């Protein structure tokens, strides 16, 4: 796909890929074999009818393509941009044997963007909220919550989403940069879901403003918790309390949700030094590193304790980071962060590793090399090693069982040990992908429907 030149895009926050034209989309769609076994669908957590929507694009029926996608996916423009198709639907494509599977993600993005440009929308829910329908509360307006809410609304339930932040979208809004997922795309998708009858309450912290028990007294019969993993992890090394050390969560929230990248138009400055080190090698780390570069850093480094083969980030994100000049310090473990005497970051002490036997994750264990320690000059350190469950809400639901890591214990269908509470997404699994959270939202919506029907 055509995209911005790396030398130009590091100066702006505009989206990097340009997207397919109608001609390019039709040409790519024409490569689809229309397999009867439909293996690509088996690899899609959102259960999209992939061969059908691709056939519609090939036949230049864009509105039909979008409506087919929206039958099961309420966030097509989002998924087309940030879903790891290479590990899911595209991985299952029979053409993967040729080395070039169908570019399913880009075709989904094309259908969604073309529909938005032409103001094509799915037919409104023909039934709307059923008279006397059960009320369902969805806590968290991230990908899991939005998906569960949309699916339940289609079934005629009276759904309200409660979101703690001032903007909906969850990680789509606060975590993913503008150059990967423009905020207007998220707003458009959320407005479409609201058009299906879903109510949305912002700045509403369940556990503080009201508890689940209070909402039960107001008539809510079932609850879906999709609050994500918003509590950042740190390494526990000396110096993490110095000025200039950020969690990736805080850094990206300031940049994205609070529009620090538009300062001084928006009153949220963020201090990014000239020499930045990002600890970690997932998509979040790549996002933080690429944001730092665009905010004026001259030297940005990814510091990761394993090799490139073990990096969890998407191949496209690694490729984009490399093209933009971000350096990779692989097989490197931070030991401590040193200050300048005034409380500001100055250096990071590191140690080189070699790979040993696999650990519990199945990846080779990094083994320190004696005498390989060195200093790295830094002004800013961004820690991107993952997030856990925020305990604020969960601490108010005493009867809810949690895992050792503080996540909600729920089965594969989203059921918790509290009959009327269901959960899915990162709050259950820990930090994962957007599409995995959406899949969990879909599954939980079906389980909630079954639960409410059985109560009748």
Image: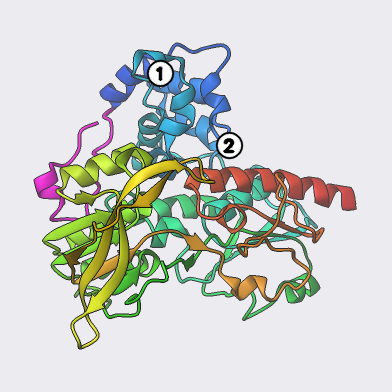
How far across and how far down the image is residue 422, in percent? 71, 56
Residue 451 included in the magenta stretch of the image: no
In the current view of this chain or complex, which residue is farthest to the right?
456
Q: Main secondary structure of the magenta part?
A: loop
Q: Is residue 13 above or below residue 44?
A: below
Quarter where residue 259 is shown: bottom left
Can you see residue 59?
no
Can you see residue 144?
yes
How far across and how far down the image is residue 90, in percent? 44, 26
Q: Quadrant of the N terminus?
A: top left
Q: In front: mark 1 or mark 2? A: 1
* Left or right relative to 155: residue 13: left
Under circle 1, the secondary element is helix
Q: Is residue 386 above or below residue 41?
A: below
Q: Which residues are magenta?
A: 1-21
Residue found at x 80% / y 74%: 217
Task: Give me the disc on residue 231.
Answer: none
Disc 2 residue crowd, few under 14, some 14–19, many 20+, Cα 10 Å = some
How far across and how far down the image is residue 227, in percent? 57, 62
* Left or right relative to 47: residue 342: left
Q: Nearer the viewer, residue 362 or 1?
A: 362
Q: Is residue 406 above or below residue 108?
A: below
Q: Nearer the viewer, residue 396 or 58?
A: 396
- Residue behind mark 1: 96
Task: Give me the disc on residue 72.
Answer: 2
The first of marks 1 and 2 along the sequence is 2
Task: State how the image is colored.
Answer: rainbow
């Amino acid at each position: 796909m055509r995209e911005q030149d790396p030398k130009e895009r590091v100066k702006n926050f505009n989206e990097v890929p340009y997207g397919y034209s109608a001609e390019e989309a039709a040409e790519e769609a024409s490569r689809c074999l229309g397999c009867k076994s439909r293996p690509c669908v088996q690899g899609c957590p959102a259960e999209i009818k992939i061969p059908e929507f691709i056939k519609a694009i090939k036949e230049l029926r864009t509105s039909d393509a979008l409506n087919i996608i929206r039958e099961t996916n309420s966030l097509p423009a989002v998924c087309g941009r940030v879903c790891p198709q290479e590990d899911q639907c595209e991985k299952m494509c029979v053409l993967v044997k040729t080395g070039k599977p169908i570019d399913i993600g880009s075709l989904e993005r094309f259908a969604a963007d073309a529909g938005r440009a032409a103001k094509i929308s799915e037919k409104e829910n023909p039934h709307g909220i059923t008279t006397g329908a059960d009320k369902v509360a969805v806590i968290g307006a991230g990908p899991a919550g939005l998906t569960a809410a949309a699916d339940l609304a289609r079934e005629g339930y009276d759904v309200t989403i409660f979101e703690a932040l001032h903007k909906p979208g969850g990680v789509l809004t606060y975590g993913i940069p503008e150059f990967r997922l423009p905020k207007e795309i998220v707003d458009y998708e959320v407005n479409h879901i609201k058009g299906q009858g879903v109510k949305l309450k912002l700045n509403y912290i369940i556990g503080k403003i009201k508890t689940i028990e209070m909402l039960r007294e107001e008539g809510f019969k079932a609850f879906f918790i999709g609050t994500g993993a918003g509590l950042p992890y740190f390494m526990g090394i000396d110096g993490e309390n110095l000025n200039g050390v950020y969690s990736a969560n805080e850094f990206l929230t300031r940049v994205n949700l609070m529009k620090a990248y538009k300062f001084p138009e928006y009153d949220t400055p963020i201090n990014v030094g000239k020499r930045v080190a990002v600890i970690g090698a997932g998509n979040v780390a790549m996002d933080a590193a690429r944001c730092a570069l665009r905010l004026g850093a001259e030297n940005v480094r990814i510091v990761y304790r394993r090799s490139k083969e073990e990096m969890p980030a998407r191949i496209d994100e690694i490729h984009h980071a490399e093209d933009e000049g971000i350096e990779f310090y692989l097989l490197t473990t931070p030991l401590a962060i040193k200050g300048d005497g005034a409380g500001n970051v100055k250096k990071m002490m590191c140690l080189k590793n070699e790979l040993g036997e696999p650990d519990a994750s199945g990846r080779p264990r990094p083994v320190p090399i004696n005498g390989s320690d060195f200093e790295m000059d830094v002004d800013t350190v961004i820690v991107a090693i993952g997030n856990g469950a925020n305990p604020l809400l969960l601490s108010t639901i005493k009867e809810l069982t949690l895992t050792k890591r503080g996540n909600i214990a729920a089965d594969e269908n989203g059921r918790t040990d509290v009959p009327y509470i269901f959960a899915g997404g990162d709050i259950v699994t820990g930090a994962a992908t957007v599409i995995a959270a959406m899949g969990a939202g879909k599954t939980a919506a079906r389980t909630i429907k079954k639960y409410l029907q059985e109560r009748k």
